[in-house]
Image: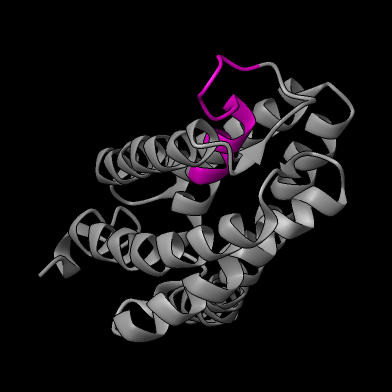
């Protein structure tokens, strides 16, 4: 009788776990959008640290729940460095400006680096479907990258100093950057259990 009850309990709990895992990509997507708005609106209001703090909390929770936090941390750190260099180049050449953000002249603001870290945390959770589709990732990057920045500009967090050159540069850059991030996520996938690493 006790064995039957134990087995029944396991069967009842299994779908719940499966359901939670099935919804996890959606949860990550929603939290990613919340982090984006927190950073962008915080930057526009002159309190960018609120968005940065929120993103740090999200990434910390993410690292605590993944199977291989060290690998996932390497991915996030690498993406932040790559994104920081790219964004700083765009700022240095005067294509974009961040008038409401506290920043070192010629460098991207900290809240933008936080968004790169948040994006990296979503690659192995929300955007796993892009991993075998590098060409699609490139196309999606070319479209979604500039749109995200135009959204940030509409909310007042940044300015397109040179609108058309900036848009074209962002499209070209993201067409390369998103596939690069996808390739890195294959190498450092901290979400997959160790036994499934190939």
Q: Residue at x 47, y 51 (%)?
A: 121
In the displayed structure, would residue 55 be above or below residue 124?
above
**Residue range of the region highlighted in magenta in the rendering:** 103-116
Q: Is residue 140 left or right of residue 133?
A: right
Residue 129 appears in view: no
In the displayed structure, would residue 12 be above or below residue 75?
below
* Quarter of the image where one finds residue 89: top left
* Quarter of the image where one finds residue 138: bottom left
The residue closer to the viewer here, 111 or 86, is 86
Which image quadrant: the C terminus?
bottom left
Residue 164 appears in view: yes
* Quarter of the image where one finds residue 43: top right
- Residue 52 screen position, x and y as percent: 66, 28
Q: Is residue 195 left or right of residue 120?
A: left
In the displayed structure, would residue 24 be above or below residue 181?
below
The residue closer to the viewer here, 137 or 56, is 137
- Residue 40 screen position, x and y as percent: 77, 41
Q: Residue at x 58, y 30 (%)?
A: 56
Q: Is residue 186 left or right of residue 138?
A: left
Q: Residue at x 56, y 78 (%)?
A: 22
Q: How many marks?
A: 0
Colour scheme employed for the rendering of this structure: one colour
Q: Residue 160 in magenta?
A: no
- Residue 160 screen position, x and y as percent: 71, 48
The residue closer to the viewer here, 88 or 42, is 88
The residue closer to the viewer here, 17 or 42, is 42
- Residue 116 screen position, x and y as percent: 50, 44
């Amino acid at each position: 009788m006790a064995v039957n009850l134990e087995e029944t309990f396991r069967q009842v709990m299994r779908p719940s776990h499966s359901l939670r895992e099935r919804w996890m990509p959606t949860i990550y997507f929603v939290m990613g959008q919340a982090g984006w708005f927190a950073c962008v609106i915080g930057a526009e209001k002159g309190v960018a640290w609120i968005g940065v703090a929120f993103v740090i909390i999200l990434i910390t929770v993410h690292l605590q729940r993944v199977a291989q936090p060290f690998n996932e941390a390497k991915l996030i750190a690498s993406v932040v460095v790559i994104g920081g260099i790219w964004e700083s180049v765009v700022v240095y050449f005067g294509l974009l400006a961040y008038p409401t953000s506290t920043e070192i002249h010629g460098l991207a603001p900290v809240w933008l680096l936080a968004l790169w870290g948040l994006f990296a945390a979503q690659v192995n959770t929300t955007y796993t479907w892009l991993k075998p589709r590098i060409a699609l990732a490139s196309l999606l990057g070319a479209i979604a990258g500039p749109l995200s920045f135009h959204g940030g500009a509409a909310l007042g967090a940044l300015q397109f100093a040179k609108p058309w050159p900036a848009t074209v540069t962002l499209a070209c850059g993201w067409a390369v950057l998103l596939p690069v991030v996808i390739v890195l996520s294959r190498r450092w996938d901290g979400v997959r259990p160790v036994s499934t690493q190939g």
